[in-house]
Structure formats: structure tokens, C-alpha cells
Amino acid sequence: MNKTQRLFREQDRRARRVLVAALAGSALLAGGALAVVGARVQQVHLAYRLDALRGQRDRAEANVRQLEIEVATLKAPARLEARARQLGMTPPGRDQVRLAREYVAASTGLAAIRSRAASLSGVPPTDIGSPSLRQRPTLQQ
């Protein structure tokens, strides 16, 4: 061989294909392994977050139970009566109490008397309520 000649090597196409396939397979395996590791890390992160949220929920439920007990205590009739007496309130007299059925628009009670009187006299029901009508007039049917 003289100096002007160069060695020329033919490339083996089969070896190149094998090398490319091996590199592609290695890349796929590495990518799959990274995906599995990433999923596992995410799973652990979510497990910690779930535990924190469960603890928060348990504390909130305990707080709700405590507040329900406090509300029941504050609404207790004996406590309300004692507090009303502290404020100077007294039980109402018989003349201060009105039964709810007197105000129901039906065939009995004060509302019925007022509406009947208004329809007979032509006066609006709001103006009726004078002492003369409170004597329960008997209406002829």
C-alpha cells in the first residue's frame, strides 16, 4: 500500500440496524422505568396528602360535634329562662298571650271574624279591630 491509497471500510448495514434497535429498546426501557418511578413518587405524594386531608376532616368533625353540643347547651330552656331573668324579663301575663290559631285565616278565630266583618261592612280588614268587634259577634248563616 502506498501513501496515496486509503483504506475504505464498507459499513455493515445489519450491524447498524442492530445498534439502532438496541438503542431504541434501551430508551424505551429507561423511559418505562422512569414512568414507573414517577407514578410511584406521585402515589406516595398523594398518600401523604390524603392522610393530611383525613386528619383535617376528623378535626372538622370533632369541631362540629363540639359546636352542636354548645348550641344545645345555649338553647336549653333552663339557661334561656335564667338569662331572661338576668335581663329583667318576666313571664307574660294572660292578657299578653295570643294563641296562634286566632290569626289563621280559616273559619274560626280572630282572622275569620275580621274577614267576615269586613265583607259585611265594606271596610278593609286592616281597619277592623275596634273594641266593638272584639266582642265576637254572632253571624247569622
Image (spheres, rainbow, N blue to C red):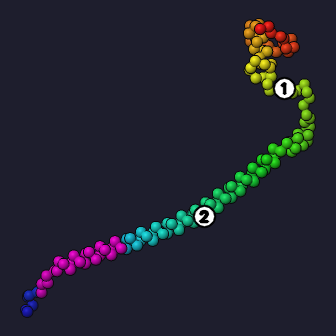
Q: Secondary structure at mark 1?
A: loop
The reply, left or right, for residue 92 in relation to residue 26 is: right
Q: Amino acid at mark 1?
A: Arg
Q: Amino acid at mark 2?
A: Asp
Q: Is residue 111 above or below residue 67?
A: above
List the single residue furthest toward the front. Answer: 141
Residues at marks 1 and 2 touching, judged by CB atoms closer than 8 Å: no
Q: Residue 63 at what x, y percent from top left?
A: 72, 55
Residue at image coords 53%, 68%: 44
Asked whether residue 29 is in view, the answer is yes
Q: Nearer the viewer, residue 48 or 93?
A: 93
Image quarter of residue 66: bottom right
Q: Which residue is mark 1?
A: 98
Q: Secondary structure at mark 2?
A: helix
**Which is more N-terminal, label 2 or label 1?**
2
> Residue 46 magenta-drawn?
no
> Residue 16 magenta-drawn?
yes
Residue at image coords 78%, 50%: 70
Q: Is residue 83 above or below residue 27?
A: above
Circle 1 Cα neighbour tier, 10 Å, few/some/many (<14 / 14–19 / ≥20): few
- For the record, the magenta segment spans 7-29
Mark identifier at residue 51: 2
- Quadrant of the frame with the N terminus: bottom left
- Quadrant of the frame with the C terminus: top right
